[in-house]
């Protein structure tokens, strides 16, 4: 077909990646032209239509164990840069849709047999790997029952929002201004889009509001977004992999590489508000009963879980369909599958301990850790409010334990840095699972927040004010 000049054959050759420049600088990925490949749609006769199929072919070169590379003037094993002694070149290749992944892999390995025969005994070995999930067609398959159910739930939520908003604007808006609000009307107003938007964008505050926390949240979330942007950038194909070690040494990049620390700000704020609100309630109602504790737990769970569950459902169904591309399945595929099977781990907020390396919504580890700290917080809140000396002792013990745990884990596991900004996926997963995700290594910030909230409440109760000089006005 290529010799005959058929356009579909020329497009397949054109969409297939070739050997790229910059291999010695770490440019190990060439994705070819994905859209050109998958849009090949040629009826060859009345019974058969040829479709293009884009596959990622991993050419794996096993390197000698004693092979080294110079980093910072010191010779290091090649595994320091690559994560193992295997160099992987990823190539985007275009094939007819009838070719299964295992056959493509077999054809490549058969072609590489003479090379392996020639280099036998040198410590080198060359082979290919093609995963079925790395082969993509333009068609995405039929919609599943789960996808239809989730779609109907979303439509129902939108319908309720439209009905309640209309009722609010047409008849309830003036009524609630002149008469006491009935619980049924409150339920309707809770789904009014206009009221919720007004509340979200309102800048009104009461004397009890800690406005400084809003600014702290803004700066922290900007830091989180910046850090995640670069973290996922490192996971993408790079053309300058060998420059990463030099980038890690530049002090100007420390703000980016230290971004994982930004999440501790939110743990601190959560602990602060938890303690402060607890003190305010106890001042009005000193008695603390098990029933009140149970209601507090239930209230927190109901506040967070419905929206969280909907996002899990969307991740398990429609989110995977919202985009496409050669790397899409490698990025979203694992999360999509884990949300289908391990959703219950997220719903019970234990996903940072149960299969943490197989996460559904990677960012949801924070919700699990924060919820676990909230569940355990009464063990600190009540003693600190009721018996301050005992509470201080408890805080010292918990802080010491939380500080010591990352140190001991790092020492025993041989972890050199708590911030896994590296292209080594295995090293990233090891550090994340051992230090970054567990609650017991993050509780220090929450304890600091509890202590800060207790002190702030004491200052306000005694009407102690701190004045700051204005630099700008």
Image: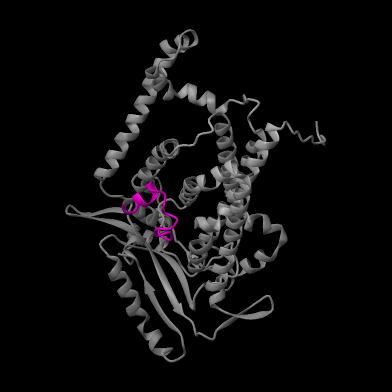
Residue 361 rendering spot, x and y as whole percentages: 43, 50
Report the magenta residues as a range. Answer: 341-358
Q: How is the image coloured?
A: one colour
* Residue at horizontal 41 percent and vertical 57 percent from the top: 326
Q: Is residue 179 above or below residue 335?
A: above
Q: Nearer the viewer, residue 226 or 446?
A: 446
Residue 240 visible to the viewer: no
Residue 122 rendering spot, x and y as whole percentages: 47, 90
Residue at the extreme top of the image, as rendered: 178
Residue 22 rendering spot, x and y as whole percentages: 57, 69
Residue at the extreme bottom of the image, as rendered: 121
Q: Main secondary structure of the magenta part?
A: loop
Q: Is residue 261 magenta?
A: no
Q: Nearer the viewer, residue 258 or 136?
A: 258
* Residue at horizontal 60 percent and vertical 48 percent from the top: 391
Asked which quadrant contains residue 256, the reply is: bottom right
Please indicate whether residue 243 sits to the left or right of residue 109 in the image. right
Q: Nearer the viewer, residue 377 or 345?
A: 377
Residue at the extreme left of the image, as rendered: 47
* Residue at horizontal 56 percent and vertical 52 percent from the top: 229
Q: Is residue 206 above or below residue 246?
A: above
């Amino acid at each position: 077909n290529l010799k005959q000049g058929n356009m579909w054959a020329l497009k397949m050759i054109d969409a297939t990646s070739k050997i790229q420049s910059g291999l010695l600088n770490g440019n190990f990925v060439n994705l070819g032209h994905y859209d050109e490949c998958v849009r090949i749609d040629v009826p060859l006769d009345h019974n058969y239509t040829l479709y293009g199929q884009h596959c990622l072919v991993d050419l794996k070169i096993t390197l000698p164990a004693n092979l080294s590379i110079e980093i910072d003037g010191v010779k290091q094993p090649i595994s320091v840069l690559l994560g193992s002694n295997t160099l992987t070149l990823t190539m985007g290749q275009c094939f007819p849709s009838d070719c299964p992944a295992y056959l493509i892999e077999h054809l490549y390995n058969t072609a590489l047999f003479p090379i392996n025969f020639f280099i036998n005994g040198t410590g080198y070995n060359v082979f290919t790997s093609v995963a079925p999930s790395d082969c993509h067609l333009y068609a995405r398959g039929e919609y599943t029952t789960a996808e239809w159910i989730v779609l109907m739930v979303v439509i129902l939520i939108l319908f309720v929002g439209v009905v309640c908003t209309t009722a609010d604007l047409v008849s309830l808006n003036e009524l609630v201004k002149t008469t006491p609000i009935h619980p049924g009307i409150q339920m309707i107003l809770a789904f009014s889009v206009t009221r919720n938007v007004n509340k979200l964008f309102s800048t009104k505050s009461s004397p009890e509001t800690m406005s400084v926390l809003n600014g702290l949240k803004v700066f922290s979330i900007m830091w989180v977004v910046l850090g995640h942007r670069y973290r996922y950038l490192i996971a993408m194909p790079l053309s300058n992999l060998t420059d990463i070690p030099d980038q890690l040494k530049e002090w100007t990049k420390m703000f980016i590489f230290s971004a994982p620390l930004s999440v501790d700000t939110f743990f601190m704020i959560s602990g602060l508000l938890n303690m402060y609100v607890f003190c305010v309630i106890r001042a009005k109602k000193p008695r603390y009963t098990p029933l009140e504790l149970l209601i507090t737990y239930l209230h927190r769970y109901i506040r967070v879980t419905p929206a969280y569950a909907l996002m899990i459902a969307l991740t398990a169904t429609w989110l995977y369909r919202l985009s496409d591309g050669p790397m899409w399945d490698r990025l979203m595929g694992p999360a999509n599958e884990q949300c289908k099977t391990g959703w219950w781990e997220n719903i019970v907020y234990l996903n940072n301990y149960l299969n943490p390396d197989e996460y559904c919504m990677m960012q949801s580890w924070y919700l699990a850790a924060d919820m676990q700290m909230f569940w355990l917080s009464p063990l600190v809140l009540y003693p600190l409010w009721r018996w301050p000396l005992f509470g201080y002792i408890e805080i010292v013990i918990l802080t010491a334990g939380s500080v010591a745990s990352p140190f001991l884990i790092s020492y025993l596991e041989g972890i050199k840095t708590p911030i896994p900004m590296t292209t080594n996926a295995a090293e990233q997963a090891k550090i994340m699972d051992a230090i970054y995700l567990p609650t017991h290594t993050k509780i220090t910030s929450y304890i600091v927040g509890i202590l800060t909230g207790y002190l702030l409440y004491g200052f306000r109760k005694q009407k102690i004010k701190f004045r700051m000089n204005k630099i700008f006005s």
